[in-house]
Amino acid sequence: MALGMAIGYGLLEMRNAAPAPSREWCLFLDVDGTLVEIAETPSAVVVDPSLTTLITAVAQRLNGAVALVSGRSIATLDELFAPFKLPAAGQHGAERRAASGRLYGANAGRDPDLDGVRAPLRAFVDSHPGTLFEDKGRTIAVHFRLAPHFEGSARCAVAAAAAALGARYEVQAGDRVFEIKPKGFTKASAAEAFMTEAPFAGRTPVFVGDDLTDEPGLRFAEQAVGISIAVGDRIGGQWRFENPREVRRWLVSIAAMDEAPRGDTRVAPPPSQSRN
Ligand SMILES: [Mg+2]
């Protein structure tokens, strides 16, 4: 599917360069594999202070219209990006914190409907050394990065668990991970919700991500006449960065945009500034 999507959007058309920054943008940024390199285990990822400083500088330049969109829980994102609490969608959109600070879905905490699959999936991980069980409350993940030979059995175990839960849940595949998440929430639904609120509303959505869970977000940005940027080669976008290092370099260029008041450019955009 990823390859088909990449072809659909034209590998020839995918540009290995950065779109020139605009003050009219709002940014939706995946975290693992996009802002930081993927680590052997999720808990091994560290966000260095320079990245936190960079993201807040970019957010300042875009009047706060920057959201993290991640498979991680918002609580974990807050730990990684402390002391800042950025607008964020966690658990693939199942929870969301608006720029106002209002929480959607995050108060639900631990989804009791997933109780029936917690023990079986934990048992699967216990009997498959190297696999990892991650309970995020509203989603449950089985990682096999350290045991790639268990990919097939992990896929079966998670699929069976999801099937037992019925139609309200689905499997989200990712980079060396299979996950159970509630249906109806995606990174696209999260981005769409942000776009109805200040300071995101009225801006051009720019979505940056590296994995299958980001595809709905990238397609949302394209449909909203925004910009889709894929990191690496797992998914397709209008633009492409090789790795998180290139993403960070591009973020620096956004933070370095001139400080002319955005209101002025919005009312009467000078041609030279409209896309640059
Ligand atoms: Mg990612």
Image: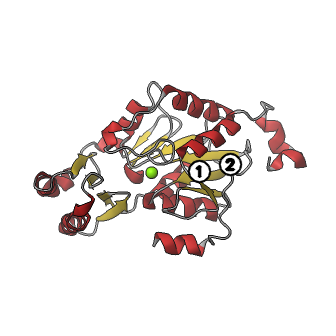
Would you place residue 60 above or below residue 158 in this image? above
- Badge 1 local density, few (<14 within 10 Å), some, or many (20+)? some
- The reply to whether residue 104 is visible in this rendering is yes
Q: In percent of the image, x 29 and y 65: which residue is there?
A: 168
Q: Position of residue 201 (x, y in %)?
A: 64, 47
Left or right for 216, reference 129: right
Depth check: give the residue in front, 185 or 178.
178
Q: Give the numbered dot on residue 195.
A: 1
Question: Which residue bears the numbered disc 2?
Answer: 203
Q: In percent of the image, x 74 and y 48: which residue is there?
A: 20
Amino acid type assigned to the residue bearing label 1 in the image: Met
Q: On the image, which quarter does residue 59 sit in? A: top right
Q: On the image, which quarter does residue 248 sit in? A: top right
Q: Position of residue 72 (x, y in %)?
A: 37, 45
Q: Position of residue 234 (x, y in %)?
A: 48, 62
Amino acid type assigned to the residue bearing label 2 in the image: Arg
Depth check: give the residue in front, 76 or 37.
37
Left or right for 269, reference 148: right
